Amino acid sequence: MFADLKNQPTTDEFLLYGIASANEGSFLELYQRYNRSVYSLAKRILRTNSDAEEVTQDVFVKIWDKALEYAPHKGKVSTWILTIAHHSAIDALRKRNSRASLPMFEEELERIPQTTQTDLLEQNMIQNALAKLEPQEQMCIELAYFEGLSHAQLAKHTELPLGTIKTRIRQGLAKLKTALGDW
């Protein structure tokens, strides 16, 4: 019976349990599964390799520290991890923008992150789901989630009422959730 268990893939939830028990092997395996996705999301938001690398490191430190805070009834581990990554990247973007007194110059040649077939498939699924939204919903979601604008900033930027912005984001996210299903 136990021989069969050795060949079974380890679930993300099991790895989080291991991390909560300070198991470095569990941490390494979870890191290997999600570091590219976390880095890609951070890079899309922050646009620099060094900032994306820093956020990626910060995200996995948070996972190590807060593994017990994961609540399976609220969603998948991948969603929890990417939510932490999104919030960390937005925080870093806001921090950078608030202290930016001198113009920042991006590296001319940036290292292209390695992507797997799974990463590309996930990116295509998300892009296709976003493309199916109403243009106003798509714009609001992209500005909020990928440019880091708060709802109030988005309302000012688009010259639309705050309630309209919130409604478009809520409706767009609901449509994305339906389109992406159990992904």
Image (cartoon, rainbow, N blue to C red):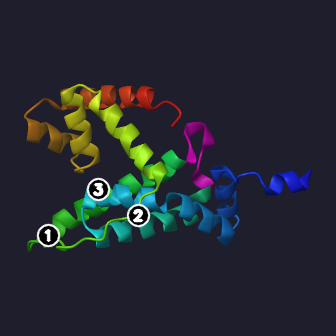
Instruction: Tell whether 76 sits left or right of 48.
Output: right
Determine which quarter of the picture holds residue 152: top left
Q: Given this view, does label 1 or label 3 mark the residue nearer the observer?
A: 3
Q: Residue at x 62, y 42 (%)?
A: 72
Q: Amino acid at mark 3?
A: Arg
Q: Which residues are magenta?
A: 68-77
State how far apart marks 3 and 2 are (Cα). 14 Å
Q: Given this view, does label 2 or label 1 mark the residue nearer the observer?
A: 2
Image disc number at residue 44: 3
Instruction: Identify the main secondary structure in magenta.
Output: helix
Q: Position of residue 93 (x, y in %)?
A: 25, 61
Q: Residue at x 37, y 53 (%)?
A: 86
Task: Compare marks 3 and 2 and give the one earlier in the sequence.
Answer: 3
Q: Residue under label 1, please give it.
A: 100
Instruction: Tell whether 168 sits left or right of 106.
Output: right
Q: Secondary structure at mark 3?
A: helix
Q: Residues within 10 Å of mark 1 (few under 14, many from 20)?
A: few
Q: Residue at x 49, y 30 (%)?
A: 181
Q: Secondary structure at mark 2?
A: loop
Q: Residue under label 2, please give it.
A: 114
Determine which quarter of the picture holds residue 107: bottom left
Image disc number at residue 69: none
Q: Amino acid at mark 2?
A: Gln
Q: Secondary structure at mark 1?
A: loop
Front residue of 45/70: it is 45
Q: Amino acid at mark 1?
A: Ala
Q: Residues within 10 Å of mark 3 (few under 14, many from 20)?
A: some
Q: Say if the magenta span includes residue 129.
A: no
Q: Given this view, does label 3 or label 2 mark the residue nearer the observer?
A: 2
Q: Residue at x 43, y 56 (%)?
A: 37
Determine which quarter of the picture holds residue 173: top left
